Image: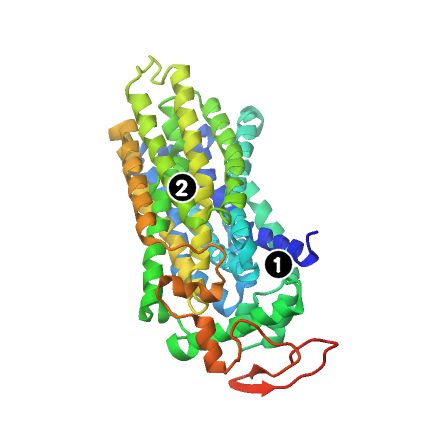
Amino acid sequence: MVSKSRVYNWYIGLLSAGCMVLYGYDASVFNAVQVNDQWKNWFDHPEKNKNLLGLINTSYSIGAIVAGWFLGGPTADFLGRRWGMGIGCFITIIATFVQCFAPQHQLGVFIFGRVLIGIGQGIALTAGPVYIGEMTPPEIRGKVMSFWQLFWSVGSFIAYWVNYASSQHVKTLGEWTWKMVVIFQLLVPLIIICQLPFIPESPRWFIQRGNRIDDARNSLRRVRDTEQQVEDELLAIREAITFEKEVVSGSYVALWKDPSVRKRLLLAFVINIGQQLSGQGTLNTYSSTIYKSVWPSTKTINLINAINATCGILFTANAVWTVDRFGRKALLIVGALGMAVCMLVVPVIGLETPTTATGGKEQPVGIAIVFMLFLFIFFYKPTWGATVWVYTSEIFSMNVRSQAVGMCSQMQNVAQCIFNQFFPQFFANCGLKAFFFFMSTNMCLAAFVWLCLPETRKVALEEVDVLFGGQNHQEKGGNILDVADAHHAQLGVDNVVGTDDKIAPVVHHDETSREIR
């Protein structure tokens, strides 16, 4: 029977993962509206200028990069993980109104809204995975984090189906054909904000910010089954943070000072950049443009995008049962090789078949190309989609976790910002031959993972440093605190409890309450 605390773990994890719906929705919004005739007319046909089209898309990435590198980490560390998610959601709501009600012919206002929404999501997407990693136990951490990418697909699903439904009523909706797609982005951040006050703050944040042991203990009691589990994890957190503050650094300086952290930062940079250069980032942003070379009908393209988003949810669900069963490394390798094959077959089909008089392909050829792009998503979603986020959120020590996760996750936007800026011109010049670039990238990513990444499956957050050549922060912190057993707290006997800046031994023999005070 599933315990009450385990169900609650899933609830708070899924609520936090809801922040990814914002990212998935917005990433799909522009792909949906850029082929919308009402949107084109409203802003004087910006699609005619390929560089301007790239700028509109990358404006989101610019805001997200600024937030991820300079705002997300400090917000989550100084105000708390919940505040980080809440502030990010609030900014997203404001930005949604800016985009939706941008005056006619004022494309600059729409672009400003996309920059603003990037800032909001950059803050929320930093706090969300950190909160999930710190609140869930190791045995289900990978499963819960899999929903992070699954919810990206949920956001994309909502955006594309709203767009498809709106496109069926153009005469009735008029300009609201595209505005309806934009305004629906209010839904999820409002739901998240309303629930955040009722979930616990991270116990690791309580210890890091003022050594608030009682608050951390109360937080852990809501998400762990037994008092022994609570005290063991509380001890592990205190040991790790004590070591980091006294031996390494309690500030972000450790990002550059600690060799093992530098190594992790570099590895995480590569896999997050690789996630976007695999082809998924470009396909999601410009799939409408790509499909236009195969299917001349806009309605057909809208339907394909909507079905793709639906399949994306189903494919991502595979990560829930595979990420903790087969491990992070195996999934990343298999995913990269599968995507490479798809990116080889798609251009071969397109280049070796004739083009019709309307500029598209024969229906069987179009179906074959769409099938291969769907198969690409099948390989991408549970591997480089979900697993990269899982890996990034769990490899950093407490003292730098928020800032490091924010920086690494925004390397996705750095890569996307650069590549998406010139992809429209790249695709216009090379056509489907551009897919050979993605094939090569995926082959290189498979080799990189095989040679460079250690496996982190079911490793406690406080012990993950050892995998990257660092010291065991839990055991070293236990030595500093003079703890007899660094891995297990002893209930009802001598234990060390930190008060403010002091470490003092305390004896407690109350077997009824079974607490360490």
Q: How is the image coloured?
A: rainbow
Amino acid type indicated by mark 2? Leu
Q: Image point 46% across, 67% down: which residue?
A: 398
Which numbered circle lies on residue 334? none
Is the residue 504 above or below the residue 24 in the image? below
Frontmost of labels 2 and 1 is 1
The percent coordinates of residue 381 (x first, y second) are 46, 40
Residue to which mark 2 is pinned: 107
Q: Of 385 and 41, which appears nearest the observer?
A: 385
Q: Which residue is mark 1?
A: 196
Q: Nearer the viewer, residue 179 or 159?
A: 159
Q: Is residue 454 visible?
A: yes
Q: Is residue 414 above or below residue 25?
A: below
Q: Residue furthest right?
A: 512
Q: Label 2 to label 1, Cα distance in Å?
A: 34 Å
Question: Residue 183: x and y, percent?
Answer: 55, 42
